[in-house]
Image (tube, grey):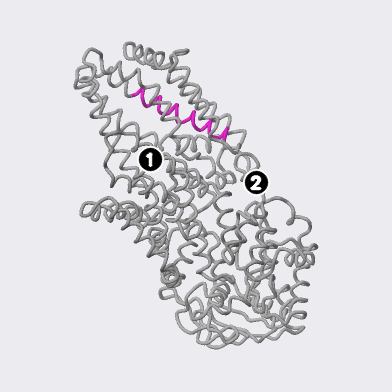
Amino acid sequence: MAFLALYFMLTFLALGISLFPILEKQFPDSDPLILLNGFLFYWFLADLLMRFFLQKLPVMNIKPLLVLPIKRGNILHYVLGKSAVSFFNFLPLFAFIPFGIMLILEEYGTTTAMVWMILMVIFTLTINYLNIIIESRSAETELSFLPIVLIASALFALNYFEIVSFSTLLANGINAIDVNPILILIPLAILGVVYYLNYAFLMKKLYVDGSLKAKTKIASTSDMTWTRRFGTIAPFLQLDLKLLWRNKRPRSSIFILIIGLAYGLFFYPNPIYQGLEWLYVFVGIFVTGIFIINFGQFIPAWDSGYYKLLMSQNIRYKEYLNSKYSLMVMSSIIMFVLSIPYVYFGWKILLVHFAAMIYNVGVNTYIILLAGSFNRKKIDLTQRAAFNYQGTGAVQWLVGFPLLFVPVGLFFAPYKLIGFEAGVAFLIILGAIGVVFHQKLMNFIVTKYLNSKYKMISAFEQDN
Amino acid sequence: MIKVTELSKKYGDTTVLNIALMEISKGQSFGLVGNNGAGKTTFFNLVLDLINPTTGNVTNHEIQVNKSEEWKPFTSSFIDESFLIGYLTPEEYFYFIGELRGMNKADIDAFLVQFEEIFNDEILKKRKYLRDLSKGNQKKVGIIAALIGRPEVIVLDEPFANLDPTTQIRLKKLLKDLTVTTNATLLISSHDLGHVTDVCNRIVVLDKGEIVKDLITSAETLQELEAYFSV
């Protein structure tokens, strides 16, 4: 997480520093500040969307405070105040402050620059509290992200087709405040209103049977008799499928398949990448292996909540791991089949995707299972999904890179020395070797898991 | 039968369990009592090979538990909620455990009928996931699941905690009948001296990891235990 936070901070910082010179250079006739103000509507819209998916609602942690001798009002002020110092509110500052300093250096006047920066902070906080309202309202429904996406797209559409030009309105407002700083009281008042709305809304829900109550879902069951044909691994396969479908976090690795499938569209239609055949390998591994990387890297942490059960029940480790293996193989095959339409961009792509699938099945799956035996981080299945890096250790980050880049390298050598077909054949041969030695490889992996059994059990008991 | 030899578990310099020799014979119902930190759960975890002993070993029907996994087919247990799979319904959980123990759906359905009383209409066909059940109902599911597949050794850590009074009484009867009808070895722990003397025919008191009393249950046992713990 720290890695990602740092990345975003640096990106925003770079943006803040470079934005003014870029705008000045690209649009020499316009005033960069006014130009930027015109775009701020989109910025705020994106900010709102990002928060909705990434920022956690602060409400759930206040249950222990309720029974302490603290006024309810103070609890809420504390919770709302705490959300104001969230990372998501500091992040934009990394862009706004350098830009503000540029304004001072470019002789816009210190007052204008200061007013502008304060204004940005007010807007950021307003979005913060707005998001809490939206999130707590929509959290109860299953497709909870639908309202926000609809609202955001509606605002965007209204603006884009100039039915109501929010971006101009907002820009005019900001420009007016820059000219006449006393008007800053208006956005400040809006912030106050949004804060109060939040306060009033949460006050009503501050009971253990209100928003604090854990939601119970109606269980939907299915027999999944089709899994029977997989023999001894069938019960585990059923368990894994239920794991995937019934928990928010693993469910996201199903949705990510769609992203993976579309990934080729970034590269293949672009003429720049035409003829870069080694790039096909990268895309092919990504498309047919996205589930393997996404789901596989958290084996066996997915089952950390009941690992002791699995370790003391009448279970053979091999069947348990074989089920995970089969699931990954199936995902790879399905993704290959779905990616066949890419043949439109050239038959070589199809060939490379096929080789990538075989390589994923025969090499990458084993690597990721082996890496799993070093897994020491528990996953709480009830946590929400996007950008939740619980369960991620250094090993998990490291494992992604060789999975994606090693096959590119393996393809590259014979491709340069002999030719395209040799590269493809090499990947297929490597994959085939893995498939042939399946039993041996699995036995080896099982011993690795057995060796770290006690360490895993005790690690999965810790709350991290 | 279970045999414990020179078994000890240390965390750093602290010894949490130290048992020189103990045998639990087949069909015995064995109760473990002791205050918090006495080492009860540690002992069960060692029996189930969930932690590694510092010294010594446990054998279960002549199989050393940390050397071979062959004890698993005839041993079952419920230690805590981490033995439940939260995203399954109770039925699915029972079927899953059944599969692992060679019982199909119909077998399990037939098996569950006898526990209707204990389930009290709050478990089955409620369309609820285990994670959404109350603590007491979760416990019921875990205990009943540990009885699936005619195990010869059953390990239950604090089976009576969190249960309502009626269920406690029903569970006591169930466990007593069980050792008689199936000749299974039962290992339980409890903080309720009354329950444990009712159910078990042998009671061992642990204190800071050491055995301080080893009693065959008689009419005076409850008094003796109460006297011991009234300090």
Q: Is residue B117 visible?
A: yes
The chain containing the residue under callout 2 comes to A
Nearer to us in this view, A76 or A134: A134
Mark identifier at residue A417: none
Q: Which residues are magenta?
A: A118-138
Amino acid type indicated by mark 2: Thr
Nearer to us in this view, A328 or A60: A328
Nearer to us in this view, B85 or A2: B85
Label 2: state its secondary structure. loop
Q: Is residue B230 visible?
A: no
Task: Specify the principal SS of the magenta part.
Answer: helix
A336 left or right of B25 in image: left
The chain containing the residue under callout 1 comes to A
Same chain under badges 2 and 1? The reply is: yes
Report which residue position mark 1 lands on: A264
Q: Quadrant of residue B185?
A: bottom right
Amino acid type indicated by mark 1: Gly
Query: Quarter of the image containing the N terminus of chain B?
Result: bottom right
Q: Residue B26: image x %, image y %?
A: 67, 85
Residue lying at 74% horizontally and 67% vertically, measured from the top left: B107
Query: Quarter of the image containing the C terminus of chain B?
Result: bottom right
Q: Is residue A371 magenta?
A: no
Report which residue position mark 2 lands on: A216
Is residue B55 positioned above or below B114 on the image?
below
Nearer to us: label 2 or label 1 = 1
Q: Residue A125: image x %, image y %?
A: 42, 29
Dot 1, how many residues are within 10 Å of its Cα: few (below 14), some (14-19), or many (20+)? some
Dot 2, how many residues are within 10 Å of its Cα: few (below 14), some (14-19), or many (20+)? few
Q: Residue A168: image x %, image y %?
A: 39, 14
For marks 2 and 1 on the same chain, the one whose residue lies earlier in the sequence:
2
Is residue A257 positioned above or below A162 on the image?
below
